[in-house]
Image (cartoon, rainbow, N blue to C red):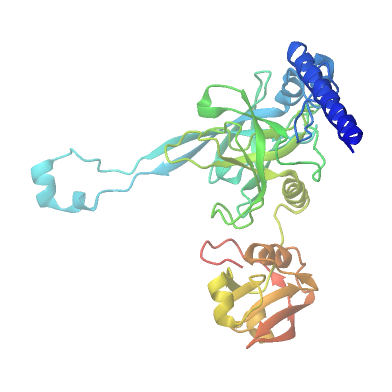
Amino acid sequence: MYRFWLLFSQFVAAIAVVVAALFGLDRIAPGLLPFDGAAVTIREAANEVAQSRAPWQVASYAYAASKSQPSVVNIFTSKEIRSQRNPLMDDPLFRRFFGDRFPIDNRPQRVSNLGSGVIVSEDGFILTNHHVVEAADEIQVALSNGLTLDAKVVGTDPETDLAVLKVKRDQLPAITFANSDMQRVGDVVLAIGNPFGVGQTVTMGIISALGRSHLGINTFENYIQTDAAINPGNSGGALVDVSGNLVGVNTAIFSRSGGNLGIGFAIPISIVRQVMREIIANGTVTRGWVGIEVQEITPEVAESFGLKSTDGALIAGVLRSGPADRAGIRPGDVLIAVGGKPVKDSSSLLNLIAALPPDKVVLLNLIRAQKEMKLPVTIEKRPPMQRDVQE
């Protein structure tokens, strides 16, 4: 037994000496041993500069800017307005005391506006925002080479805030459209336009979010949100990727001061392409309509109606003698599908119905008194935009 304990003590002492030696060696030359004593395994970037740079990182965006800048134009519009005649000027007593201090006529005055646009075809079609050319009676387009051309409106779509112009010029530098399914949050983008009228300007940022809606900017909303600086005058300009391809059309900013606060919105290329083609082909955009007003289903609304989830859209109003009214849809119904396609919220319902052609009969799945039912409705053409009607 004594011999056993002697051997055991010698073994423990040997281990202690080895551990102490390794510890001392690690203190003298850190990193020499194959372990660092930590209990957590971590991944560290390579030390070599060539390996530390990710393959999608670039040192400059000059290529993207030089490729897309010639396709972005400055738009100058003007319209004639008449000042309102002061009704007090018809009062002889007022005229007696104040004379001609106030204007007595309503002579027309011209008001100018500026914005940006994007050349989308070599034969002269230019895309911009509806609010840039709204009510304008004179439109001029300044190309990047300094040439100024008169433009006419081919058609507009106020509900997406898009418009198509045409100039009499060939071989224009048309922009290249990006793939509509390739954008990701975090992608670098460049905003090109004419902010504050200072001249063509390029700003850089990233895609902050995709599919932004419920902003109250337009009827149909599916915006790209970006922190690339977008200021007044950028409206209608291009939002491009690092390859210089068009991913969206700048349309709005979120600001309390009128300047850029790092939150801008662009219409995505998927909507731009669809609206542009319809306007060029028909001069307008045709959408489906059933004559209903809808609202979001909040958790409180879902609980009060006995719904299992907040998916769907609550019918808040039905237009008398409209398609939905004739189909038997009532206020308080909850629409959950259109033609077999599920309704996530009021925005998706609006898009599903708008995508349907007039005169098409479609089944609407709805919940009434906690019972699911289907009703056929005949789609009609959506009337001109009215701000107080959601669908």
Q: Position of residue 211 (x, y in %)?
A: 68, 51
Quadrant of residue 250 within the rendered picture: top right
Residue 41 x %, y %: 79, 34
Q: Residue furthest front?
A: 2
Q: Can I make out residue 317 in this image?
A: no
In this rendering, is residue 296 above or below 254? below
Query: Is residue 39 in view?
Result: yes
Q: Is residue 140 left or right of residue 89?
A: right
Q: Residue at x 64, y 83 (%)?
A: 329
Q: Place residue 13 in its image quadrant.
A: top right
Image label count? 0
Query: Which residue is painted at 66% across and 80% down in the image?
Result: 324
Q: Position of residue 89 (x, y in %)?
A: 20, 49
- Of residues 185 and 32, which is closer to you in this image? 32
Image-based side of 277 in relation to 158, left or right:
right
Q: Residue at x 33, y 44 (%)?
A: 106
Q: Please tell me which residue lies in front, 219 or 241.
A: 241
Q: Quick one: quadrant of the N terminus?
A: top right
Of residues 76 and 100, which is closer to you in this image? 76
In this rendering, the answer to whether 74 lies above or below 301 is: above
| Quarter the C terminus occupies | bottom right
Residue 178, image quadrant:
top right
